[in-house]
Image (cartoon, grey):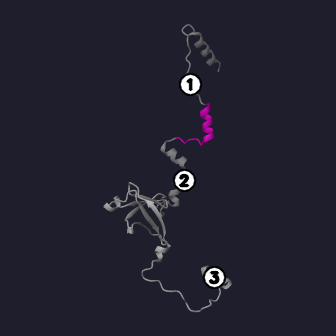
Amino acid sequence: MLPAFMEDYNARFAKEPRNAKDLHRPLAPDENLDGAFAWREERTVSASLTIQYAKMLFILEQDEFSRSLVRKRVIVSDYPDGRVVITHNGRPLPYSIFDKVRQVTQGAIVDNKQLSALADPRELRILSGRPTPLPVSNAARNLLLRQAPRRPFRLLEAHEPSNCSASENQLASNANQY
């Protein structure tokens, strides 16, 4: 697709140069195009020798020089080829990466035969002996909690009228009506 696009683009917009001689100069050995195209940002080293960049946690290796960099600024260089280099005053620092955004590897994906056994969580709950909870929205749950009594019900026992006060007799007669 790219060659077809380039032909079409050049056919529409290309112009003949005024001078046919190629005036591009070769790249000198001391010139570094990778460094020119690298994205650089400053970060501060934490007390635990970590730096956060691009949703990843870079953990500096523990050595005397790294421990002296606590609360100091370092430069994180992100190169177009995917390399990340952390430097302080031009000195590269060794590190390891802790990726905060975990990605699933192909080996962790289950094939169809195993997936069918894991598909229905209710079956797993039945097998484990745990009851399946009813799906209740937050609004319905809040409504049920508002309507619920504050204290648990106590069953009223049948009292002898001679042993009860008048208020207890009234409560017992009210309970018997329902």
Query: Please, which residue is most extreme toward the left here?
Result: 64
Query: In this orientation, which residue lies closer to the viewer: 26 or 102?
Result: 26
Q: Which residue is mark 1?
A: 153
Query: In this orientation, which residue lies closer to the viewer: 166 or 117?
Result: 166
Position in image of residue 128 (x %, y %): 48, 44
Q: Mark 1 or mark 2: which comes first in sequence?
A: 2
**Quadrant, the C terminus:** top right
Count of numbered labels shown in the rendering = 3
Position in image of residue 18 (x %, y %): 62, 90
Residue for point 45% across, 68% down: 77
Q: Residues within 10 Å of mark 3 (few under 14, many from 20)?
A: few
Left or right, 58 with respect to 25, comes to left
Q: Nearer the viewer, mark 3 or mark 2?
A: 3
Point out the stretch of residues depicted in magenta: 131-147
Q: Is residue 17 magenta?
A: no
Position in image of residue 84 (x %, y %): 44, 67
Which disc, if any, is residue 81? none
Query: In this orientation, which residue lies closer to the viewer: 81 or 103?
Result: 81
Residue 17 placement: quadrant: bottom right
Q: Which residue is mark 3?
A: 4
Q: Which residue is mark 2?
A: 119
Q: Mark 3 or mark 1: which comes first in sequence?
A: 3
Q: Mark 3 or mark 2: which comes first in sequence?
A: 3
